[in-house]
Amino acid sequence: MHLDVRDLKTFYYRSALGRAAQKAIRDQVVEYWPEAKGQTVVGYGFAVPLLRPYLGDARRIVGLMPGPQGVMPWPAGQKNVSVLSEEVNWPLDTGSVDKLVLLHGLETSEHPTALLEECFRVLGPGGKALFIVPNRAGLWSRSDRTPFGFGRPYSLMQLESQLKMHHFLPERHRAALFAPPSSKRFWLRTAPVWEKTGRKISSYLAGGVLIVEATKQIQAPTRPGLPVAFKRPLGVFEGIRKPKGRPVGEGI
């Protein structure tokens, strides 16, 4: 079940808790990917708040928003890069994406298998993706006051297993949103401290969201009739003595 884009916009841009969550997750994304100079960066779901650091140097930025969710123009005051898209038929060429971010995309999808196949299709060789999902063990997935309380939360093992099944290679993981999902002033004011402390204590158990970086695995091509090179000839007849006697016809 996808959330409505108006509710997501209200949470991330008009509430103090949403702005704190946006910053905490975006800081982690930037630690993974400090820059994207000359690259194509795509976000799916409601990932546009995380793409802002790359507006200046990326070759192309696209914010894909699924039809059931709805779309909003982004970024404000600049040329729009957000697009309403089908969930499993993106308007992108195969292998055209360098970096891909999913936020509120995988856990709310009604077709997660087909969605991951589409992610694999659009990524170029060596392309990287960040999958950001609610943490099954965290507090945020247990509260419906935030967008992370909707959809299917994941454990780290569940998420990495699903990615491997679709030919992604999980490389790094971490968590974010270690403060409780509360709008009280104390928790909002101390949120940066909780984020810093939480990453030192646990990489995924206590955080509200899991962030897994994965790369696209390319299978080695196989085709019939490939030549086989041997370093040395096969010694099939090694050890067999040469026949003794005169050659046939000798002395006749």
Image (spheres, rainbow, N blue to C red):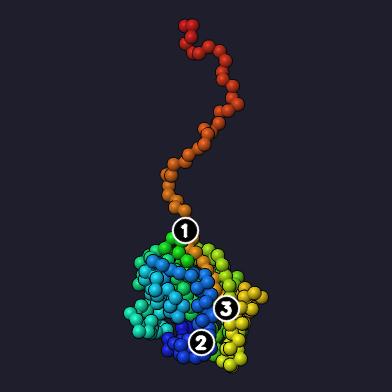
Residue sitting nearer the eye, 30 or 171: 30
> Is 222 left or right of 189, judged from the image as shown?
left
Residue 183 picture quarter = bottom right
Give the image location of residue 89, x and y in percent. 38, 72
Q: Which mark is residue 29?
A: none
Query: Seen from this angle, which residue lies furthest right?
Result: 201
Q: Is residue 45 visible?
A: no
Q: CA distance from mark 2 to mark 1?
A: 37 Å
Name the kind of residue labelled 3 in the image. Answer: Ala
Secondary structure under tag 3 reads strand
Residue 9 sits above or below residue 167 on the image: below
Q: Residues within 10 Å of mark 2 (few under 14, many from 20)?
A: many
Q: CA distance from mark 3 to mark 2?
A: 13 Å
Residue 5 sits above or below residue 224 on the image: below
Query: Seen from this angle, which residue lies furthest left?
Result: 79
Name the residue that disc number 2 marks.
18
Q: Residues within 10 Å of mark 3 (few under 14, many from 20)?
A: many
Give the image location of residue 100, x and y in percent. 45, 70
Residue sitting nearer the eye, 125 or 244: 125
Give the image location of residue 229, x and y in percent. 48, 39
Counting residues from the N terminus, which is met first, the one under dot 2 or under dot 1?
2
Q: Which residue shows up at 57% across the image and 70% down it?
A: 173
Secondary structure under tag 2 reads helix
Q: Is residue 82 visible?
A: yes
Q: Residues within 10 Å of mark 1 (few under 14, many from 20)?
A: few
Q: Which residue shows up at 59% across the image and 22% down it?
A: 241
Secondary structure under tag 1 reads loop
Name the residue that disc number 3 marks.
176
Name the kind of residue labelled 2 in the image. Answer: Gly
Q: Which residue shows up at 52% across the image and 34% down it?
A: 232
Marks 3 and 2 close (CB-CB < 8 Å): no
